[in-house]
Amino acid sequence: MTHRLDPLLRPRSVAVIGASVREDSMGDWVLRNLERSGFDGNVYPVNPGYDEVRGRECFSSISDLPEAPDLAIFAIGDHRLEASVDEAIAKGVRAAVIHSSLFLDVGFSPRFVWPARSTRHFYIPAESHVREYRIPRLVSR
């Protein structure tokens, strides 16, 4: 039996958006921790600036991945986050972890403001709990 949070808590595949060869960057940190933990699923580094990261083929974009990963881990700047999350939703990614301040514009409190493009659920850890977002309700201004 599978649980609806399996893509977040027990993913079979993970994309690391913002994967990097720069030591101690968030993208490098995420990849190292996946390796150290013994994660045995598919790991897909995503960064248009590299062909390879930590011995793995690096993809230019989420849409270039050979499959829709269960989990996307975002280690990118806020200015790239909105478009990248849209791309992950379009690819069929079912859960996300976002390493970001989520400060998207001056005068806005941090919140998710990208437009919905699907009717599926998308799980995002928020503070000390997991919030389930029904994609059409993701916009909250």
Image (cartoon, rainbow, N blue to C red):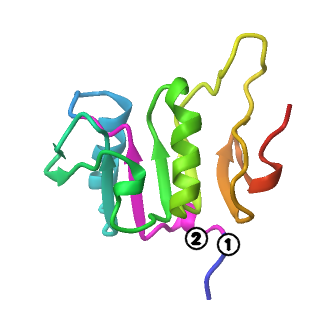
Magenta stretch: residue 7 in it? yes
Residue at which label 2 appears:
6
Q: Is residue 53 left or right of residue 86?
A: left
Q: Position of residue 57 (x, y in %)?
A: 19, 53
Crowdedness of circle 1 by 10 Å Cα count: few (<14), some, many (20+)? Answer: few
Q: Is residue 12 left or right of residue 88?
A: left
The quadrant holding residue 13 is bottom left
The label on residue 4 is 1
Q: Residue at x 50, y 30 (%)?
A: 80
Q: Residue at x 31, y 40 (%)?
A: 47
Helix, strand or loop at label 2? It is helix
Residue type at mark 1 is Arg
Q: Position of residue 88 (x, y in %)?
A: 52, 53
Residue type at mark 2 is Asp
Q: Residue furthest bottom?
A: 1
Q: Residue at x 60, y 25 (%)?
A: 101
Q: Which residues are magenta?
A: 5-20
